[in-house]
């Protein structure tokens, strides 16, 4: 029952830790007792018959009837001894069985006692936990009530603060509205004065602008006449330079064709229909930078003879004017034909 404790009898042994351990121990004990009882109940094997004789002196041999009687007595004694041993073994087995049952009963009682103690401890722990839970719940409810009260007070203070702020804001708004009206009136007055001044300045600016536009138109017409005269002069100069460059380029192109014609030796297989087009690139010094076959004649020997002629000239005749060189002689194409060299 709850609230009562049973007396604990110390046996000098460590208490069993669980009903499972008690059960295992009891099974081991029963197995040991059964094994010992089986050993004790096994009847001893009969001793082998043997005859020991000691020769002291010649004696008369007993008659067969006497020897048979002795053997019968010995057999009777042996059977009685075996019966006594069996009875003793049975009494010992019963005593051990009784001791085993008593030990098992005590073990079960000890297990029940420990289980009862465990249940009582669990009940006490549960009761303590419930008590602590009730105390915590009460503390939580108290804290919630205090927090709600603080929130209510805080909300009340916030409401009063907002009302005061609203009142001040309304007063400030009225003051600012009055100030705005005064400033608006002053602004309109200044704007009217500024408008009148701006109108006066606009009219004056328009007058000056018309005068400046007339002057600008006259100046623009003068500049256009001067620019047209410069363009005409520059065009005439460009045409003169172009004519001079063209004339000079034709002169040096004729010199280059003459030099290449002298250096070219077409093969014997060349025909009048064969033409090889080569692209020549020169340096400002007149030296050959590169040569490339851009149009083959269809005859490798003919093409190679044209390439050899171009490469054979150490220096090409070029004009001194850099513009003429860059335009006509930096890179140009020439055709090799047995009838003409262009």
Image (tube, helix red, strand yellow):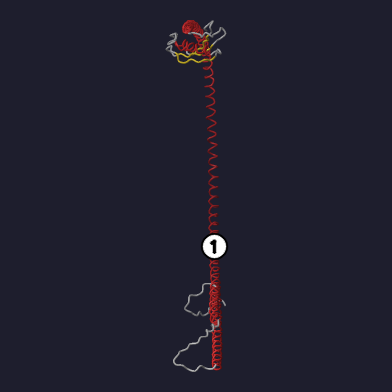
Q: Which residue is mark 1?
A: 140
Residue 16 visible in the picture: yes
Position of residue 2 relative to residue 213, above or below, is: below
Position of residue 224 relative to residue 139, above or below, is: above
Q: How many marks?
A: 1
Position of residue 325 relative to residue 69, above or below, is: above
Image quarter in which the N terminus is found: bottom right
Position of residue 17 relative to residue 72, above or below, is: above
Answer few, some or many: residues within 10 Å of disc 1's Cα (few below 14, many 20 plus, some between 14 and 19): few
Which residue is nearer to you in this view: 94 or 289?
A: 94
Provide residue 325's location: percent of width, then percent of height: 46, 11
Provide residue 259's location: percent of width, then percent of height: 46, 7
**Residue in the image at 50% along x and 87% along y:** 51
Which residue is nearer to you in this view: 27 or 317?
A: 27
Which residue is nearer to you in this view: 300 or 293?
A: 300
Provide residue 18's location: percent of width, then percent of height: 53, 72
Q: Is residue 89 left or right of residue 288?
A: right
Q: At numbered mark 1, what does the secondary structure look like: helix, strand or loop?
A: helix
Provide residue 4's location: percent of width, then percent of height: 54, 78
Residue 233 visible in the picture: no
**Residue in the image at 53% along x and 51% along y:** 161
């Amino acid at each position: 029952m709850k609230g009562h404790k049973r007396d604990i009898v110390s046996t000098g042994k460590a208490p069993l830790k669980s009903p499972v351990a008690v059960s295992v121990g009891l099974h081991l004990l029963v197995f040991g007792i059964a094994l010992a009882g089986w050993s004790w109940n096994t009847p001893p094997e009969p001793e082998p018959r043997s005859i020991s004789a000691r020769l002291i002196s010649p004696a008369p041999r007993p008659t067969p009837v006497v020897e048979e009687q002795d053997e019968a007595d010995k057999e009777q004694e042996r059977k009685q001894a075996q019966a006594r041993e069996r009875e003793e073994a049975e009494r010992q087995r019963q005593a051990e069985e009784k001791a085993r049952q008593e030990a098992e009963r005590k073990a079960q009682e000890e297990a029940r006692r420990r289980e009862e103690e465990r249940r009582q401890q669990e009940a006490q722990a549960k009761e303590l936990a419930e008590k602590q839970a009730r105390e915590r719940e009460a503390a939580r409810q108290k804290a919630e009530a205090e927090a709600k009260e603080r929130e209510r007070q805080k909300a009340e203070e916030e409401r009063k603060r907002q009302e005061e702020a609203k009142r001040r804001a309304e007063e400030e708004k009225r003051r600012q509205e009055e100030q705005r009206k005064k400033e608006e009136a002053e602004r309109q007055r200044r704007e009217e004065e500024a408008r009148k001044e701006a109108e006066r300045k606009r009219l004056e600016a328009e007058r000056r602008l018309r005068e400046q536009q007339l002057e600008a138109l006259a100046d623009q017409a003068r500049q256009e006449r001067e620019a047209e005269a410069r363009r005409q002069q520059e065009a005439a100069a460009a045409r003169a330079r172009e004519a001079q460059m063209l004339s000079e380029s034709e002169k040096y192109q004729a010199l280059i064709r003459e030099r290449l014609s002298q250096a070219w030796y077409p093969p014997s297989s060349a025909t009048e229909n064969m033409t090889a087009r080569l692209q020549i690139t020169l340096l400002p010094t007149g030296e050959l930078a590169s040569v490339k076959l851009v149009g083959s004649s269809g005859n490798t020997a003919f093409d190679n003879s044209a390439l050899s002629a171009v490469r054979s000239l150490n220096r090409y005749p070029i004009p001194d004017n850099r513009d003429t060189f860059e335009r006509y002689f930096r890179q140009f194409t020439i055709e090799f034909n047995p009838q003409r060299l262009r």
